Image (cartoon, rainbow, N blue to C red):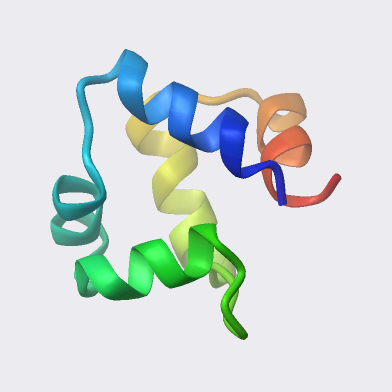
Amino acid sequence: MNKALLRSIMVLHNDTSQSLAEYLGISAKSVNDKINENNTEFRQSEIAAIKKRYSLSNEQVSNIFFN
């Protein structure tokens, strides 16, 4: 996972881990754990929601989550 790219996109949208967590319906700790790859990763449904929230292309999603 390219956490720097995800974090930069979050910053561009004035988003925080807390606000993204609220959008995804999970805790901020869970978002941070997933971003930092602490024995957990984003679910497909969460990736789809992030794609929608930030209007990401398929290529951007691939670069962030599947590099």
Q: Nearer the viewer, residue 2 or 63?
A: 2
Q: Is residue 4 left or right of residue 46?
A: right
Q: Position of residue 53 (x, y in %)?
A: 33, 35
Q: Is residue 43 left or right of residue 14?
A: right
Residue shown at 36%/29% (left/top)? 10
Q: In the figure, 29 relative to 21: above or below?
A: below
The total number of labels drawn is: 0
Q: Is residue 8 left or right of residue 2?
A: left
Residue shown at 38%/63% (left/top)? 32
Q: In the figure, 4 relative to 29: above or below?
A: above
Q: Position of residue 13 (x, y in %)?
A: 27, 19
Q: Position of residue 1 (x, y in %)?
A: 72, 52
Q: In the figure, 25 relative to 64: above or below?
A: below
Q: Is residue 59 visible?
A: yes
Residue shown at 22%/32% (left/top)? 15
Q: In the figure, 66 relative to 57: above or below?
A: below
Give the quarter of the image for residue 44: bottom right
Give the quarter of the image for residue 60: top right
Quadrant in which the C terminus appears: top right
Identify the residue at the far bottom of this view: 39
Identify the residue at the far top of this view: 12
